[in-house]
Each structure stands twice: as structure tokens, then as C-alpha cells.
Amino acid sequence: MAGKPLSGIFRYGESELEPAIQAEILLESARNEARVAILQILLALLLVAVYGLGSKESIAVAWFCVITVLPLLVDSQLRRAAARRLLGVYPHPAKPVGRPRAR
């Protein structure tokens, strides 16, 4: 764990929930963060189309987008990595054996 300094700060892997449930929650929240980031980028592109590329408004929106989207994407990746660790470390339940088919 010494090679992953940011994962220790947020402690995404620590919870009293069952690991599979916690991993699913982490994946869904990571997806939602990625969707918000994509929405912000699309809105920024829309404003650039309206105001033009060199306008003050476009530059301000571009900076706002960089400042808010990068942390969202980094946090989303940290959540996905924590979910992968949770699913890989803990034992998985046995797969149910299906009934034989009737012939």
C-alpha cells in the first residue's frame, strides 16, 4: 500500500459493509462522477460555441472546467481502483449450481 498514497487518504476500502456491496457502491459513485465531468465538458463546449474560443467567458469556463473536472476524474479512478481491490481481495461466494435440464 505504500505505492498508493491517495487511496490511503480517502480510505475507500474501509467500511463495515460487505465487500461486494461496497464495491458496487464505489463503482456506481465513480460512474456518477464521470457523468458529471462529461456534462461539465459538454456545457463548456456549448459555451465556447456560443461565445467563441477567445472570449473571456470561454477562458473562464475552461479554467473552471479544468479545476473541477480533473479532481472528479481522479476521485472516480480512485473509487474504481478501491472497488477492484475489494473484489479481488475478499473471498467470492460459490457460484450456484444450476438444475439439470429436463429432457
Image (cartoon, rainbow, N blue to C red):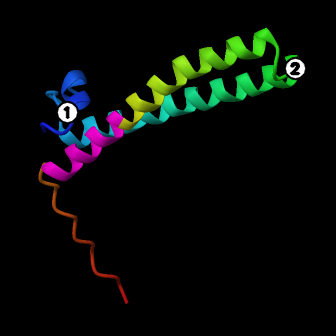
| Between 28 and 55, the one nearer to me in the picture | 55
- Snapshot quadrant of residue 56: top right
Q: Which mark is residue 13?
A: 1
Measuring 53% from the left and 17% from the top, which residue is drawn there?
Answer: 67
Amino acid of disc 2: Val
The question of residue 83 being in magenta is answered with yes
- Where are the magenta residues, as a range? 78-89
Residue 66 higher or lower than 60, as above or below: below
Looking at the rendered structure, the number of numbered marks drawn on it comes to 2
Local secondary structure at mark 1: loop
Where is residue 31 drawn, in percent x and y? Answer: 47, 36
Give the residue at x 61% y 14%.
Answer: 64
Residue type, mark 1 in image: Gly
Q: Which element carries disc 2, helix, strand or loop?
A: helix
| Residue annotated with mark 2 | 50
Q: Is residue 49 left or right of residue 5?
A: right
Mark 1 Cα shell of 10 Å, populated few (<14), some (14-19), many (≥20): many
Q: Residue furthest bottom?
A: 103
Residue 29 visible, this angle: no
Question: Can you tell which mark lies on residue 22?
Answer: none
Task: Evaluate whether residue 46 shows in this view.
Answer: yes
What residue is shown at x 46% (from left), y 31% (from top)? 73
* Horizontal and vertical percent position of residue 101: 34, 82
Residue 82 falls inside the magenta stretch? yes
Secondary structure mostly taken by the magenta-highlighted segment of the chain:
helix
